[in-house]
Image (tube, rainbow, N blue to C red):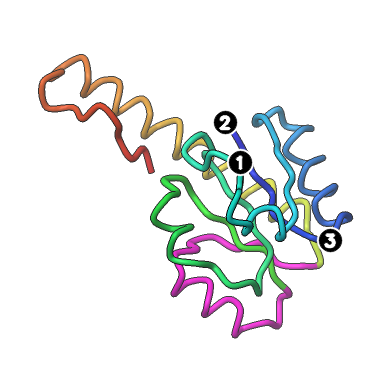
């Protein structure tokens, strides 16, 4: 599994990275907002399974169009405007601050299992009917 954490608050990124690392869920890349939203962004979003991004930030339509994985928004528990904007922008899962290790672990564990199941289904479909499978599939 490949994770991308986009956050300008280093302590939040470190906590999330530590939880992901402790449970061996996958490879982690951390990125600042500036780097992530720059025009010369060198990150390949097609390689990322789960994007964890702090809200409120402007989530551009290009982000949703280029990204086939799952987006997890991180925001303050009382920030209903950010949560609403996140849902409208394609964020389906949220982690609230202050970071609760049990919430993070439960959310990410469920999403990792979901992605793995979808990949298994894709592989089975590829074996059963290889002519109908696209060369690039949206796993999520």
**18 is higher (above) or lower (below) than 74:** above
Q: Please state if 9 lies on the left or on the right of 56 as rendered.
A: right
Query: Does label 1 or label 3 sit earlier along the sequence?
Result: 3
**26 is higher (above) or lower (below) than 42:** above
Tell me the residue at 87%/55% (across/down).
10
For label 2, the residue is 1
Residue 39 vs residue 55, the one in the foreground: 39
Tell me the residue at 69%/56% (across/down).
103
Residue 75 vs residue 32, the one in the foreground: 32
> In which quadrant of the rendered view does residue 74 lie?
bottom right
Callout 1: SS: loop
Tell me the residue at 63%/57% (across/down).
38
Query: Does label 3 or label 2 sit earlier along the sequence?
Result: 2
Q: Quadrant of the C terminus?
A: top left
Callout 3: SS: loop
For label 1, the residue is 42
The numbered mark at residue 7 is none
> Whole-Å distance between the Cαs marked 3 and 2?
23 Å
Alpha-carbon neighbours of circle 2 within 10 Å: few (<14), some, or many (≥20)?
A: some
Q: Which residues are magenta?
A: 76-97
Alpha-carbon neighbours of circle 1 within 10 Å: few (<14), some, or many (≥20)?
A: few
In the rendered image, the residue lying farthest to the right is 11
For label 3, the residue is 9
């Amino acid at each position: 599994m490949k994770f991308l954490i986009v956050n300008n608050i280093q302590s939040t990124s470190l906590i999330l990275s530590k939880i992901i690392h402790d449970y061996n869920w996958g490879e982690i890349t951390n990125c600042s907002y500036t780097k992530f939203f720059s025009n010369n962004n060198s990150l390949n979003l097609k390689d990322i399974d789960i994007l964890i991004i702090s809200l409120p930030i402007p989530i551009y339509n290009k982000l949703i169009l280029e990204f086939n994985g799952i987006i997890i928004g991180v925001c303050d528990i009382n920030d209903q405007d950010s949560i609403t904007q996140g849902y409208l922008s394609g964020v389906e899962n949220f982690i609230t601050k202050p970071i609760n290790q049990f919430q993070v672990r439960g959310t990410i564990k469920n999403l990792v299992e979901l992605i793995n199941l979808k990949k298994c289904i894709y592989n089975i479909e590829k074996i059963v009917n290889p002519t109908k499978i696209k060369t690039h599939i949206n796993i999520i």
